[in-house]
Amino acid sequence: MEQFDLLGKSFECTCGKTHFVPTREVLIAEGAIDAVYELCQRNGMREACNLLADSITYDVCGKDVAHLLRSHGVLLHEIILDADTEADEKVCDEVLSLASSHGNFWIAVGSGTINDITKLVSTKMNQPYGVVATAPSMNGYTSSIVAITINGLKATLPGNPPLFVLADLNVLCNAPYELIAAGLGDALSKPVSNADWMLSHVLFGEHFCNFCIDLLSQSEQLCASAASSLKLREPNAIRMLMEALCLSGIVMTIAGSSTPVSGGEHLISHALDMHSHTTGRKKQLHGAQVGVATLFSASLYERLLEVNASELDVALLANRYKSIEEWMQSLQGFFGNASEAVAEQFAKKYPKSKDELEMRLRKIIEVWDELFSKLRPLLRSQNELRRLLHSAGAPTTVWELKIDVEEFKEAIRLAHTIRSRYTVLDLANELCILPDELENLIQRSQIAG
């Protein structure tokens, strides 16, 4: 598609910034795996490279990649991780220690976790990498962002994007369906994450790029076209979903952060992951959680559209102010050992006093009409988003995620604390819509199941 004409290029944008897309090639086709050696050669691999996979992705196509490369005389060093490995600093350090000193190039064979680990390790080694995707499950393939757990805190770090993404439709179409559905859940969050980006732009002057929004609109259209055919594993639908996810990653790269594609809905998912790290509960797929959380965020925006800002009692709202210290008990209960790191992130954006909160609220009321005139075109109704998820058989309820509803509610209450970025969750907390109306919002969004 024409948006991939941006690959490998630098260009001046109307937003005032110069954007650069380091990824040079995205190949999504049946039989694409046969081109892996040529892609590696064109993108700087010499005679040796490191290949990272897990025990499942290696069996899926990693062994085929290895065979193809060795048949061309490549000196290949394989690092195969356990299937349940998570992307954290300890694992990344372990992979660094296992890397061959002869390799000048990395190949990631997998999806989210493998891509994140390879991205961080190759960046630390100042070596390029390419990725052979095994599922259309997440939007990080082409991004310059690494999602990693550091001391229990879900964090994002900068990383060099891959020079190529190879996605063989014969592999993607046979991926576990829950991974395909998770990819749709991740991609369909864009209306609410875009709105959160605009929210931060209007209230706090964060840089905003309409070109990024245009790309994400293309991504959204691809998802809408593909959704109902994904269950049939139709190659064209799987291709469109993978294109949408790669476009989303490119947006992160040119924006320089995950903000355009990761708003309050992603924070809810991250909060759930962090809580599972504390309790030992099995983690659910990130994209599946994001899909359900997107329905909640869309419902929350619909509730905010009903607010008459002129009727808000600023003094009364400001009197509900809680200090960071007063938040700590809840943070410790839900995030455990990560609570101090969470509080540090939260303090970067949280008003330092009741007076500061009151000043912020007055500013919000002052720009309310302008704000929502800019938000409305970005938003989609929760019913529309639910229909698309449902048509693909993707989860739309907490019950389908196999997560306790009370845990999900607590994640909603506390998700805004884990990042310094401002989202709809912060606005709803400052207006006391959260937590006061949480039960009604759960019912309204129909996510309880």
Image (tube, grey):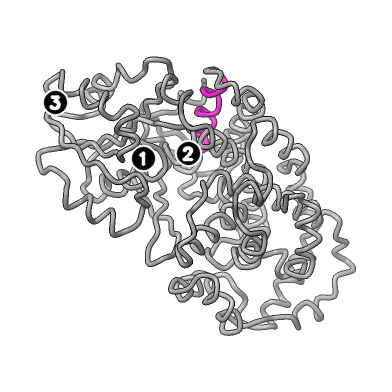
Q: Residue 243 colored magenta?
A: yes
Could you tell me which residue is drawn at 41 percent across and 24 percent down? 171
Q: Residue 365 colored magenta?
A: no
Q: How many marks?
A: 3
| Residue 286 position within the rendered picture, expressed as x and y whole percent measured from the top left | 52, 48
Could you tell me which residue is drawn at 36 percent across and 40 percent down? 161
Q: Which residues are magenta?
A: 236-249
Question: Disc 2 residue type?
Answer: Gly
Q: Quadrant of residue 438?
A: bottom right
Q: What label does residue 161 carry, if any?
A: 1
| Residue 101 position within the rendered picture, expressed as x and y whole percent measured from the top left | 10, 43
> Which one is in front in this view, the residue at disc 2 or the one at disc 3?
3
Could you tell me which residue is drawn at 26 percent across and 48 percent down? 121
| Residue 288 position within the rendered picture, expressed as x and y whole percent measured from the top left | 57, 44
Q: Residues within 10 Å of mark 3 (few under 14, many from 20)?
A: some
Residue occupied by mark 3: 74
Q: Residues within 10 Å of mark 1 (few under 14, many from 20)?
A: many
Q: Are marks 2 and 1 in contact (CB under 8 Å)?
A: yes
Residue occupied by mark 2: 249
Q: Quadrant of residue 291?
A: top right
Q: Secondary structure at mark 2?
A: helix
